[in-house]
Image (spheres, grey):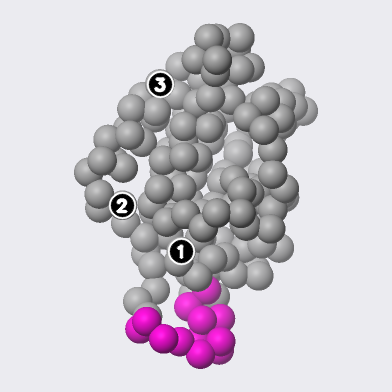
Amino acid sequence: MNIKIIGVGKLKEKYFKAGIAEYAKRLGRYCKFEIVEVPDEKAPESLSQAEMDEVMAKEGERILSKIKDREYVFALAINGKERSSEEFAKTLNQLATYGHSDITFVIGGSLGLSPAVLKRADEQISFGRFTLPHQLMRLVLTEQIYRAFTIINGLPYHK
């Protein structure tokens, strides 16, 4: 199985990088794992709705350029479907069983994901109604993917 996370912006914080690297190393037993960063669009603090839409559209184009047709895409969105860790593991296992060996997760920038990215996604998922920095979300998502594989394989990590 190939799992990819596409994230907007460059991860700068050493503590996030270290946590992600640890889970990425652990994931090596179960899948080919990669993180793809696309540049964020520089924008001033206060934007009109039209300017926000333009920023999201530009970031969306960059994201979509990194997604292949065969990939099953999860968009992380606050209004997406929430799952427990066990349900998430079951979903990943079912995707693998039914021929989806390329799975991509998309984390938007500070303004979220463009309508074009949300339309391309096969599913929208949410990790709750909290707003988290996209850098932290990469770490949380990587850990949850690792947790899913431990659940699938009956390992004690999940307990």
Q: Distance between the residues labelled 1 and 2?
A: 12 Å
Q: What residue type is labelled 1?
A: Gly
Q: Which residue is drawn at 69% across and 44% down?
A: 82
Task: Tell me the SS state at disc 2.
Answer: loop
Q: Which is more N-terminal, label 2 or label 1?
A: 2
Q: Specify the segment rendered in magenta.
A: 44-56
Q: Which is more N-terminal, label 3 or label 2?
A: 2
On screen, residue 26 above or below 133: above
Q: What residue type is labelled 2?
A: Leu
Judge from the rendering whether residue 92 lies leftward or rightward of residue 43; answer left or right: right
Does the magenta stretch mainly form a helix, a strand or a loop?
A: helix
Q: Residue at x 51, y 58 (%)?
A: 131
Q: Name the residue under label 1.
A: 109
**Residue 66 coordinates in the image, percent (x, y):** 50, 55
Task: Tell me the SS state at disc 3.
Answer: helix
Judge from the rendering whether residue 131 lies leftward or rightward of residue 117; answer left or right: left
Judge from the rendering whether residue 110 lies leftward or rightward of residue 74; answer left or right: left
Labelled pair 2, 3 in contact (Cβ < 8 Å)? no
Q: Nearer the viewer, residue 27 or 69?
A: 27
Q: Residues within 10 Å of mark 2 (few under 14, many from 20)?
A: some
Image quarter hosting the C terminus: top right
Task: Tell me the SS state at disc 1.
Answer: loop
User: In the image, which disc is placed on residue 26?
Assistant: 3
Q: Which amino acid does label 3 sit on?
A: Arg
User: In the image, which disc is placed on residue 11?
Assistant: 2
